[in-house]
Image (spheres, grey):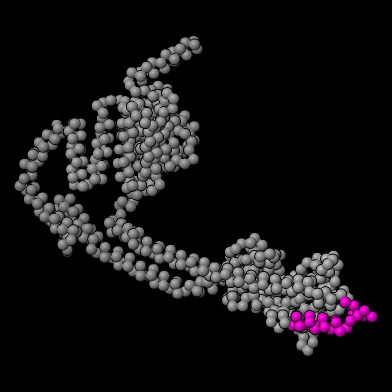
């Protein structure tokens, strides 16, 4: 099998997959192709854009809901911290107040007691706490105990076991102790159970902080505290939870949950992970949660809202987008119907009549419905049919003879010089007609012919070879509709280096045929030529699929005798280089993270004489080696 036959076979193999993939589409009727194209260009984009706008609107509104929730949590956190700070300041005031210290240390029995002074101090303290109890609804009660046995209870009379928190406060030696929620029973005319959050603190001597002189208890009503924190900041559809780090509920709209672990483990996990925004499932419904850590404490505020409520807020936008999508669909269908009636139907009729003409029926006629370009095409078709019939009947033989003579004359004139001049004439004509892109393509094609013929030369300069492959890539780029980018770089000092003609084009063609099986906008080829010592290296990169085998296996296959397979073009190029430049020349594949990387390696020579000297030295070295072995 000769080289031309192998080249053709390789081309057929390279195109077989593409033909199989698109062959069925090519044989579709124009009607169905038009429907598919119009759906792709009108209906599908319109619906896609509408859906994108719809979902983007949903995302924006969801973000607004989340931001509003975060803002509310910040305000609730501020209210909670204000309450805690206020209560702690009260306990600190007791430490520094001379009247409180006297009340807790003055004797209450015996000769040293001062009943009148104790009564004055008690009245003053009662007035101080009464002010706070009346102005702050979440204040439930307060209790002062001194080491002298004096006790003062203000606010509602409450009963219950508080010994654990009292012991904890004594162990903390004067530090503030905030309790978990616990139950106290109301005593007096009315009874009932209250969930309480309290501050316990041991009061130490101001002048000897290791000496306790009393204890203070300030109790807060959990229900009233929740109402104060969330006042005007919590929508009824939102759930707000105040949680300890372990997941214990300190405050909640549902009093039955207060004092217990929150029942949903996902909420506790995300709170402990300090996830600012999370999503979870509860009883088959999706919820969104927003977490905020209360500054300076181990407490967290969590607000949750159901996805269904969020979507209900979007119902107006959803209806509007549905109307927009319906209108877009109707417009697309009307556009398709109009295109089919005004363009596709006349073209299909013209195709049918053209087939009749092809079969020899010169009575074929197209019905002209309009005066637009399609109508003019039908009218000219009818005139052409009549003209052909007249020519066949009157001038057929004479015209055939004249054409044969003209063809022979043209064939005798076509030579490389005539071809170059003709291409130049067409190029300049295209430029005069301002068809600059067409002129540029003709210029590249002319460059290809000039370099490929190059007066029969085997070797050309590296500059000419790079110009050739640049022209080839420009034409391929235009053929592929701009779906190819390329870059050529050459070291300035090696432009006159000799290289075997048409070496780079097979490498580029290999990338186009095998590396880019599925063309896309990111396809790129880079060629870089530079000198390294006594050699010229030319690297050809692409970002395609890369080699289907390991590069070491591929490099070994370049020297195999097998003439079949997908790598024949590269093996042929490698053999040409070896035959021209000796074993110092050739191809080599280099491992690459993405795509393929082929390197051309040739000795640096600037004349045919230098190349022959290299080959002679190589032959002499081989003869010397063989003699040593003998």
Q: Which residue lies at the image location 54% right of the left edge and 68% below the top edge?
A: 67
Q: Which residue lies at the image location 34% right of the left edge and 59% below the top edge?
A: 41
Q: Which residue lies at the image location 25% right of the left edge and 34% below the top edge?
A: 449
Horizontally, residue 112 falls left or right of residue 621, namely right
Q: Which residue lies at the image location 53% right of the left edge and 70% below the top edge?
A: 65
**Looking at the image, can residue 502 be seen?**
no
Is residue 126 one of those drawn in magenta? yes
Quarter of image, res 146:
bottom right
463 or 611, which lies in front?
463
Horizontally, residue 63 falls left or right of residue 47, namely right
Residue 439, compared with residue 85, is above or below; it is: above
Horizontally, residue 29 falls left or right of residue 603, namely left
618 or 134, which lies in front?
134
Farthest residue to the bottom: give it: 189
Which residues fall within the magenta stretch?
Answer: 106-130
625 or 279, which lies in front?
279
The N terminus appears in which quarter of the rendering? top left
Residue 575, compared with residue 312, is above or below; it is: above
């Amino acid at each position: 099998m000769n080289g031309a036959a192998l080249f053709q076979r390789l081309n057929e193999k390279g195109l077989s997959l593409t033909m199989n993939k698109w062959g069925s589409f090519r044989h579709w009727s124009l009607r169905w192709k038009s429907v598919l194209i119009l759906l792709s260009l009108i209906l599908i984009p319109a619906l896609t854009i509408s859906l994108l706008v719809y979902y983007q609107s949903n995302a924006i509104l969801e973000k607004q809901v989340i931001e509003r929730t975060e803002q509310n949590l910040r305000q609730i956190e501020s209210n909670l911290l204000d309450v805690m700070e206020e209560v702690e300041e009260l306990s600190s005031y007791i430490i520094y107040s001379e009247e409180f210290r006297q009340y807790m240390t003055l004797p209450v029995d015996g000769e040293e007691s001062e009943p009148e002074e104790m009564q004055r101090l008690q009245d003053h303290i009662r007035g101080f706490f009464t002010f706070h109890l009346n102005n702050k609804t979440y204040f439930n009660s307060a209790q002062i105990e001194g080491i002298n046995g004096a006790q003062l209870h203000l606010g509602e009379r409450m009963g219950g076991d508080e010994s654990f928190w009292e012991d904890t406060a004594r162990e903390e030696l004067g530090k503030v102790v905030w309790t978990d929620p616990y139950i106290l029973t109301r005593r007096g005319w009315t009874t009932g159970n209250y969930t309480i959050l309290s501050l316990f603190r041991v009061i130490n001597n101001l002048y000897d902080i290791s000496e306790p002189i009393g204890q203070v208890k300030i109790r807060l009503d959990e229900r009233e505290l929740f109402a104060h924190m969330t006042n005007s900041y919590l929508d009824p559809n939102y759930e707000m939870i105040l949680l300890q780090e372990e997941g214990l509920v300190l405050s909640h709209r549902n009093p039955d949950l207060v004092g217990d672990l929150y029942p949903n483990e996902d909420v506790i996990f995300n709170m402990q992970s300090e996830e600012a925004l999370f999503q979870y499932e509860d009883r088959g419904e999706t919820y969104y949660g927003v977490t905020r850590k209360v500054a300076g404490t181990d407490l967290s505020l969590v607000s949750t809202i159901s996805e269904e409520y969020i979507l209900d807020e979007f119902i107006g936008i959803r209806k509007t987008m549905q109307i927009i999508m319906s209108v877009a669909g109707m417009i697309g269908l009307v556009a398709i119907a109009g295109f089919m009636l005004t363009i596709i139907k006349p073209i299909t009729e013209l195709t049918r009549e053209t087939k009749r003409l092809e079969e020899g029926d010169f009575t074929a006629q197209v019905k002209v419905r309009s005066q637009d370009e399609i109508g003019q095409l039908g009218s000219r078709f009818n005139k052409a049919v009549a003209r052909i019939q007249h020519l066949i009947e009157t001038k057929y033989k004479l015209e055939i003879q004249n054409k044969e003579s003209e063809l022979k004359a043209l064939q005798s004139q076509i030579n490389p010089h005539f071809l170059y001049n003709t291409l130049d004439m067409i190029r300049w004509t295209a430029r005069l007609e301002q068809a600059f892109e067409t002129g540029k393509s003709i210029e590249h094609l002319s460059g290809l012919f000039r370099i490929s013929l190059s007066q029969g030369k085997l070797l050309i300069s590296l500059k000419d070879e790079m110009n050739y492959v640049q022209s080839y890539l420009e034409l391929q780029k235009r053929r592929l509709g701009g779906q190819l980018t390329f870059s050529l770089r050459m070291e300035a000092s090696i432009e006159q280096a000799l290289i075997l003609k048409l070496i780079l084009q097979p490498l580029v063609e290999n990338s186009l045929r095998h590396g880019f099986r599925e063309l896309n906008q990111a396809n790129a080829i880079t060629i870089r030529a530079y000198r390294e010592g006594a050699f010229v290296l030319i690297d050809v990169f692409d970002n395609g699929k890369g080699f289907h085998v390991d590069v070491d296996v591929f490099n070994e296959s370049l020297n195999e005798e097998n003439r079949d397979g997908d790598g024949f073009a590269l093996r042929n190029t490698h053999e040409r280089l070896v035959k021209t430049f000796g074993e110092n020349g050739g191809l080599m594949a280099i491992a690459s993270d993405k795509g393929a990387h082929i390197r051309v390696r040739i000795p640096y020579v600037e004349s045919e004489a230098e190349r022959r000297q290299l080959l002679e030295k190589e032959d002499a070295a081989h003869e010397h080696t063989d003699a040593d072995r003998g």
